[in-house]
Image (spheres, rainbow, N blue to C red):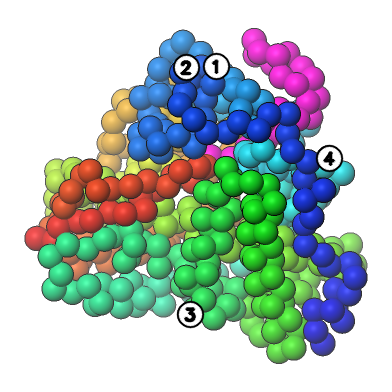
Amino acid sequence: MTVDDRFGPAYREPHEDEFPITRNEIITGPVADWATDFSHLEPEWSADPYPIQDDLRQRCPIAHTERFGGGWLPVRYADVAAIAYDTERFSSRAIIMSNVRPPREIAPVGGSPPISSDPPFHHHARKLLLPAFTKAAVGRQEPSTRAFCHTLLDAVDGQDVVDAARDYAQHIPVRVIADMLGFPPEDGPQFREFVEDLLEGINLPTDERIQRVNRLFDYLVRQVDAHLERPRDDLTSYLLSAELGGRKLDPDHVVGTMALLLIAGIDTTWSAIGASLWHLARTPADRERLMAEPGLLPTAMEELLRAYAPVTMARLVTGDMHWRGVDMKADDWVLLSFPAANRDPAQFDRAGEVVIDREVNRHAAFGLGIHRCVGSHLARMELRVALEVWLRRIPVFSLADPDAVTWAAGQIRGPRTLPLRIG
């Protein structure tokens, strides 16, 4: 059986006329006032968004912009949480803020279920994935993940300076998600290109952006074809055989979910591992304490996730309304900054500090509400193993050049270059 036999004419890639241009083409450029003209794509935001968020929290807790066709940025935990839980007034049919909005008709399924799905469909789409991401299922991935981390460090053994983002952090989730989906591990470089296309290329012309998205879909269809021809014990074959309501999943559902698992499974964990190593490199007291008290690592991990939460999600307003002092219009964007929520002093003591033995830590790094990350157990395992192996093999390290560290732009923030001096 081939993809044409199974999917037939029902499967197609997105076309430009289905993603209309928004009311305003402007995305990037200097920001005069973050309260009235924010843009999360600017270099100062990617380099250090926290002072900007702190300032907004004091004077304008729900910022606005005319970029992206109009959008809002709440920075208080209470506001972010309220929107995350309100699925009637805030739709998830698009989660990447850009100059294109998918048509309302694609709800409640969306392009990448379940993250793009609204109730009631979301519940069923999410339930399909839960068995693959239980603690027990994730635990079976740990030995191979640990072995791979050692292999990565073997490759840089003896170097005075190691780029911990390029040579270590990025490869770990690539290998793990490739194994889970049953994709060839040698395709890893393509996965990183897909991540950049979808999450960092949103300022590209619309036709070029859609062309890049189609590269991902072309790849996924080839993988579907290979799995239809030779089923195997992996997530791709599982999705191809899964049913909702007594029917096989629609082709768009299968490929959209595969895209979600591939992209979300890589960039978020890559960013969390890199940010954690960046913090330990510039904070020797925390690094030394973890070496002396290795049992503290799980607690410290949660604090690093809180302080350097990588993920920001978007929602679309479903109808005109007055909400907590601002007038939102239908199809306005709302950018849910979980990193900003995690540093709200109204929610956390010493919110702007990294307290690696913080005991009470109900952070939002994995999101809030029905869309809380289905892969949180997997991400925690990868982060823990990556840090355990690194600290065991490389107990002493520091930033080789703080100015050489670069951070991803867009809604997933993490180091992209991270040169560390060993010893």
- Magenta segment includes 322: yes
Looking at the image, tell me whether mark 1 or mark 3 is earlier in sequence order: 1
Secondary structure category for the residue under label 3: helix
Disc 2 on helix, strand or loop?
loop
Distance (Cα) linking label 4 and label 1:
27 Å
Inspect the image, locate mark 1, and give the three-letter code of the amino acid beneath it.
Answer: Thr
**Mark 4 or 2, which is nearer the eye?**
2
The amino acid pointed to by label 3 is Glu
**Residue 365, horizontal then vertical, whole percent:** 48, 42
Which residue is label 4 attached to? 104
The answer to whether residue 346 of the structure is visible from this angle is yes
| Amino acid beneath label 2 | Asp
Above-or-below relation of 133 to 17? below
For the residues bearing labels 2 and 1, Cβ distance under 8 angstroms: yes
The earlier-in-sequence mark between 4 and 3 is 4
Q: Secondary structure at mark 4?
A: helix
Mark nearest the camera among 1 and 3 is 1
Q: Which residue is mark 2?
A: 33
Q: Is residue 13 above or below residue 28?
A: below
Relative side of 82 to 410, left or right: right
Q: Is residue 352 above or below residue 133?
A: above
Residue behind mark 3: 186
Q: Is residue 380 left or right of residue 236?
A: left
The part of the chain drawn in magenta is 311-334
Report the disc number at residue 36: 1
